[in-house]
Image (cartoon, grey):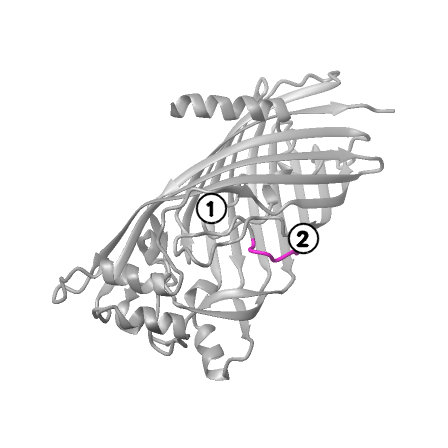
Amino acid sequence: MKLYTFLLQTTLIITLSVIIRNVDAYYLPVQFYYPKLGYTEPRIQKDWLTSAQACVSRGATSHALNCQGQRVPLFDLYGIQDLSTLTSNVIVNSGEQSCLANLPPLPNNVLSISGHFRFRQTLVGITQNICNGFFVSCYLPIRRLGVSMPRLTNLTPAHQEAFIPVLDATMACFNLNRTNSRPVGLGDVVACAGKTWCLFDNPHLDFIDISLQAGFMAPTSKKRNENQIFSLPFGFDGHAGFLLVGDCSVGAYDWLTVGAHLDILIFTSVIKTVRIKTDLQQNGIIFLQQARAGLVKKPQCSVSAYIKADHFTRGFSIVGSYSFTYQGHTELTLFNRPLKTEHIANTDNRFAAWSMHTIHAALEYDFTTRNDIAGPRIGIFYDRPVSGRNIFLTALWTGAIGIDICLNF
């Protein structure tokens, strides 16, 4: 059944479009739960070149790197859960109070929360050259984020009583649950415009290519469900963004290419209801208090470098690359709450900065010959986080297929 599902999904994607002439979709902004995809090259400077592309990414993990960069069970990402502080300083309304009155107090247990995360993404994009190096592009990600096998492990040997029913009942009083989830939804759509400069007159090099882009990320993604502790956002949870991208590459010896990449994403602020931390000793992913807050997310920045053996045998190319991504912290401004509460909420590791070091490998085959109007290409990519803070350790395999069509009027 899994093979049938994979073949069906691949067939649908091939029907939608056909892959990658340049892997320019891979600069797209990323989340802490999956790595940046592959490498990126400057856009080819050819008037009225159309590139359609699609790729399917799959990855899974049961581990994370916490704020100290230590490898931990998946949902210990933000620290272990101490039940003794869970209700500290929580403002309880009348309905919640009557619900809690019928329950025994929470035990003073410390919990480790593990689980298995699966990431699935279908990325469809199209890039259209106009003339004089100008081009426009648009990318549509569709994701499935699965969390399964969550387990709450008591780390307090002196307290072995059955704590899970009490914890579940307490969370239910605050409309909170730990239901497994495997939702499917749209990510944040990105549209860009850019320009490429191709320099061929260097006597010692094959070429020097440079491209610059500016774009907008629309907040189209499915948002995090604040009432489910294992829920994850499909994008940036309502934040729109402005994207700046730069790429350069240098070719030599008719087969060797080296390149570098930089992208910066600047976010708009949002106002929404979130679960907040109410005690300085609280950590983890379970928080009872809800509050209306303004969220200011600091920019995301990625840099990368790659080396490519381009068409080293027939149409085959092989690439090795490295990238570093840094996402700044999110600052909360609480409405109708004292400054002390706002200070506590802003110590929450869920809103802290995160960073990711990733290695990438790619193998491509280009079916294009010199005089072809249409040129298909296929590829397989592997992306693995090797270090970082506040991230999931999700390694990705990506299969890609696409086509370039050159209509030079």
Q: Quadrant of the C terminus?
A: top right
The disc at residue 243 is: 2
For the point 35% across and 67% down, the residue is 283
Q: Is residue 241 magenta?
A: yes
Q: Foreground: 379 or 182?
A: 182
Q: Quadrant of residue 11?
A: top right
**Residue 117, image x and y in percent?**
38, 44
* Residue 102 visible in the shown view: yes
**Residue 328, image x and y in percent?**
54, 63
Q: Which residue is mark 1?
A: 34
Q: Which residues are magenta?
A: 236-242
The disc at residue 361 is: none
Q: Is residue 150 magenta?
A: no
Amino acid, disc 2? Leu
State the residue lying farthest toward the right.
409
Q: From the viewer's perspective, tell me whether residue 356 is left or right of residue 65.
A: right
**Residue 145, image x and y in percent?**
45, 43
Q: Earlier in the sequence, mark 1 or mark 2?
A: 1
Q: Quadrant of residue 247?
A: top right
Q: Foreground: 393 or 4?
A: 4
For the point 14% across and 66% down, the residue is 159
**Residue 286, image x and y in percent?**
36, 63
Crowd rating for badge 2 (residues with CA inside 10 Å; few <14, some 14–19, many 20+): many
Q: Quadrant of residue 108?
A: bottom left
Q: From the viewer's perspective, tell me whether residue 273 is left or right of residue 376.
A: left
Q: Quadrant of the N terminus?
A: top left
